[in-house]
Image (cartoon, rainbow, N blue to C red):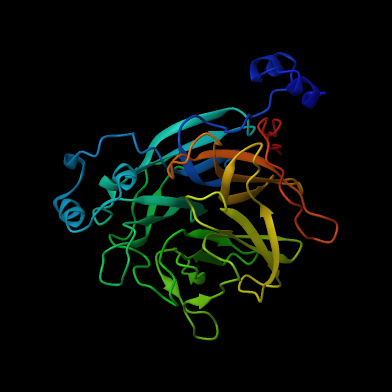
Amino acid sequence: MMKRLLRLGLGATALLACGLATASNPIVPGWYADPELRVFGGRYWIYPTYSDHAGTPDVTDRFSPAQQEARKRKTVRPSYGMQTFFNAFSSADLVHWTKHSHVFDVRNAAWAAYAIWAPSVIEANGRYYMFFSANDIQSDNELGGIGLAVSDKPGGPFKDAIGKPLIDKFHNGAQPIDPFAFRDKDGQVYLYYGGWQHCNVVRLSRDLRSVVPFPDGSTYKEITPPGYVEGSFMVERKGVYYLMWSEGGWTGPDYSVAYAMGPSPTGPFKPMGKILKQDFAIARGAGHHSVVQVPGTDDWYIAYHRRPLDTDRGEHRQVAIDRMVFNADGTIAPVVMTREGVAPRPIATK
């Protein structure tokens, strides 16, 4: 019935009146990208990159002297000048979202001069830890990489946890960007990351503030699958580990999501192909995703960004959520992009 109403042209207001409201894609107004979807305290949380090139003015009085000096030494792409903070959004049902402004700002990390993006937040030790990319470094001689901030609440404010980047060098050729924090069933937290077509995984200490060796003595394990570009993500289901990532150019229509399957958090992984790509009837450049399992169920949702059909601007990206379905053999069915989005999905309370 809901699809029939949508075909008749009824919008979200009419659907709500019928008791059939969906989220509608994009789920929130504005230009946002790289959404990470999590569940904290019985609510869904999304942490995206702010992607509005015409947003907050790039005023120097918001930066420390060290940050201003770092910005002077490097040519900054215009949109990067605006990417100096994160907003977050929370929801009880995946449909109605509340905005939490400036949950993290570079003013709270003196070394992060500009270009913060792709946050990943995990709960640990009674607090919330945010890993993030900063400064878009191009070599080991530049200051930046993957930072760590911490807060007592999922809605922030987050503040720099260690006073420097957690990972600030190129290991195995991987640019230190696009972190994703994954907790395995035994409690061990792994950090997946990497740009420039290389993907690494590291083990984190119990306090998440340092990288620790694997049992074999190695520290930075490269697990790059074929076609990998950036945006690595990990999920475990029924003993199978799914390494996911983005392929193609982040500003292009070929941006897409692929995955591989393996027996452990470090593989080995078998590539399984793409599950999300452009649909010329809906949007282009669909990628840099995250996935969430509704607690206590085998229901899964994928959050991702995509580019409207009427713009070619690289920064013009919007956040969408759709269903993600596992086949009977454990493989993932291709994701169907929609305009209507998902139906309300509250989290059951005990």
**Image quadrant containing the N terminus:** top right
**Image quadrant containing the C terminus:** top right
Identify the residue at horizontal 77%, vertical 60% (top origin): 331
Quadrant in the picture for residue 81: top left
**In the image, farthest residue toward the right:** 328
Say if 239 sits above or below 157 in the image.
below
Is residue 38 visible to the viewer in this orientation of the structure? no
Residue 140 in percent (x, y) is at: 30, 72
Quadrant in the picture for residue 173: bottom left
- 107 on left or right of 50: left
Identify the residue at horizontal 55%, vertical 42% (top origin): 306
Q: Nearer the viewer, residue 34 or 112?
A: 34
Q: How many marks?
A: 0
**In the image, farthest residue toward the bottom:** 216
Q: Nearer the viewer, residue 203 or 177?
A: 177
Identify the residue at horizontal 25%, vertical 45% (top origin): 107
- 114 on left or right of 192: left
Q: Nearer the viewer, residue 345 or 314?
A: 314
Say if 333 sits above or below 263 in the image.
above
Residue 266 in percent (x, y) is at: 61, 73
Residue 172 in percent (x, y) is at: 45, 77
Say if 15 sits above or below 262 in the image.
above
Is residue 53 visible to the viewer in this orientation of the structure? yes
Identify the residue at horizontal 51%, vertical 29% (top origin): 98
- 210 on left or right of 320: left
Residue 7 in percent (x, y) is at: 76, 23
